Image (cartoon, helix red, strand yellow):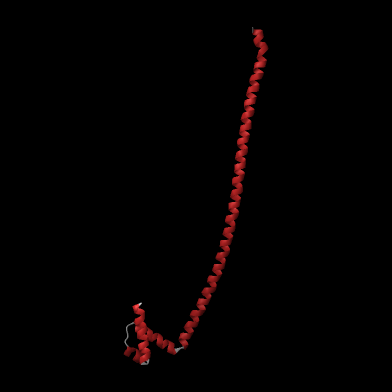
Amino acid sequence: MLDVVLHWLPLGVSVCVGVVALLLLRSEKKARHQLESKYQAMELLAKNARQQHESLSKQFNELRAGSIGMSQKLAELSHRFDELVDKQNELEMHDPDGRLYSRASKMVELGADIHELMEECDLPKAEAELLLSIRKQRMLR
């Protein structure tokens, strides 16, 4: 009987080795397939990340260009505003009647009556009445 066992033992070992090898090959194939799937998913994620980065970079550059343009426009408007203020101040200094009406307008705001306007600002009665009328209309709004 020992002869029979010794005779079939190499065959049994060979079959066991074959079964183990087959199981290992299946396991390796499954692991390789999972690895390839994960690699493809990773490549897809990297591609999406690159596309998103490019899109965000383009948007950022557009925003930057827009803000530079707005900054230049604001500087231009600020310069024009300063010029207008200078011109207005110059006109007020060269227009004595304008200063007179400005003074009369301030007096009306402070509650001056028609006689005070006529005396202090040397205004005709009709002009003094007009200033008071304008003041009353503004207060009604």
Quadrant including the C terminus: bottom left
Measured as percent of width and height from the top left, residue 9 is found at 65, 14
Q: Quadrant of residue 126?
A: bottom left
Residue 27, compared with residue 113, is above or below; it is above
Name which quarter of the figure residue 12 lies in: top right
28 in relation to 118, above or below: above
Identity of the residue drawn at 57% across and 58% down? 59
Between residues 93 and 37, which one lies in front from this camera angle?
Answer: 37
Q: Is residue 138 above or below residue 39?
A: below
Q: How many marks?
A: 0
Query: Residue at point 61% right, 50% down?
Result: 50
Q: Residue 87, image x and y in percent?
A: 50, 82
Q: Position of residue 5 (x, y in %)?
A: 64, 10
Quadrant in which the N terminus appears: top right
Where residue 107 appears, x then y in whole percent? 35, 85
Specify the farthest residue to the top: 1
Which residue is painted at 59% across and 49% down in the image?
48
Q: Is residue 130 left or right of residue 18?
A: left
- Which residue: 64% across, 8% down? 2
Report the side of 22 relative to 131 (left or right): right
- Where, by quadrant of the figure, is residue 54 drawn? bottom right
29 shown above or below 125: above
